[in-house]
Amino acid sequence: MPWTLSLETMPPIDVIIALAGYAIGAFGGVLVFIEFFQTPSYINYQSEWDDWNVDIAPSDVDEYSTAGRVGAILIALAFALEFVATLL
């Protein structure tokens, strides 16, 4: 008999929410990890001179990228899902 998903074979809802939280948190962690290794927008490298320049103008500085912001939100969502799963 092939395996089918029914109410008897389905895991409890708190386990499903916890697993979803783990997956979302892992993806958010990867995005934050990527954020850590990006070169800031105000640092420039000139390969012909082997020179690094730091030009800081407050209006041009991007402190965080979209990947880091989305990753932080996903990690926060993962913690919220884990909290809800614990309460269930």
Image (spheres, rainbow, N blue to C red):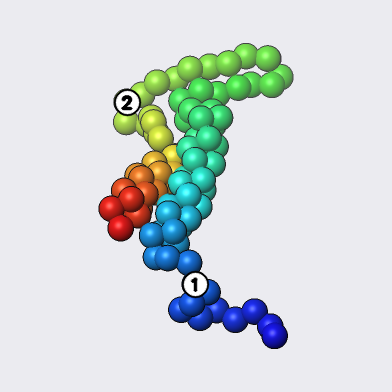
Amino acid marked by disc 2: Pro
- Name the spot of residue 28 as percent of width and height, x first: 47, 45
Disc 1 versus disc 2: nearer the observer: 1
Q: Which residue is mark 1?
A: 10
- Name the spot of residue 82 as percent of width and height, x first: 37, 49
Crowding at dot 2, Cα within 10 Å, few <14 / some 14-19 / many 20+, comes out as few
Nearest the camera: 35 or 50?
A: 35
Image quadrant holding the N terminus, namely bottom right
Cβ atoms under marks 1 and 2 closer than 8 Å: no
Indicate which disc, 1 or 2, sits on the residue closer to the N terminus.
1
Which residue is situated farthest in the bottom direction here?
A: 1
Nearest the camera: 44 or 16?
A: 16
SS for dot 2:
loop
SS for dot 1:
loop
Q: Which residue is mark 2?
A: 58
Q: In the image, 68: left or right of 58?
A: right
Q: Is residue 77 above or below residue 38?
A: below
Which residue shows up at 49% across the image and 72% down it? Answer: 10
The answer to whether one can see residue 28 in this image is yes
Amino acid marked by disc 1: Met
Crowding at dot 1, Cα within 10 Å, few <14 / some 14-19 / many 20+, comes out as few
Residue 5, quarter of the rendered image = bottom right
Residue 84, quarter of the rendered image = bottom left
- Name the spot of residue 9 as percent of width and height, x first: 52, 74
Which residue shows up at 44% across the image and 59% down it? Answer: 15
- Name the spot of residue 25 as percent of width and height, x first: 46, 46
Q: CA separation, marks 1 and 2?
A: 54 Å
Image quadrant holding the C terminus, namely bottom left
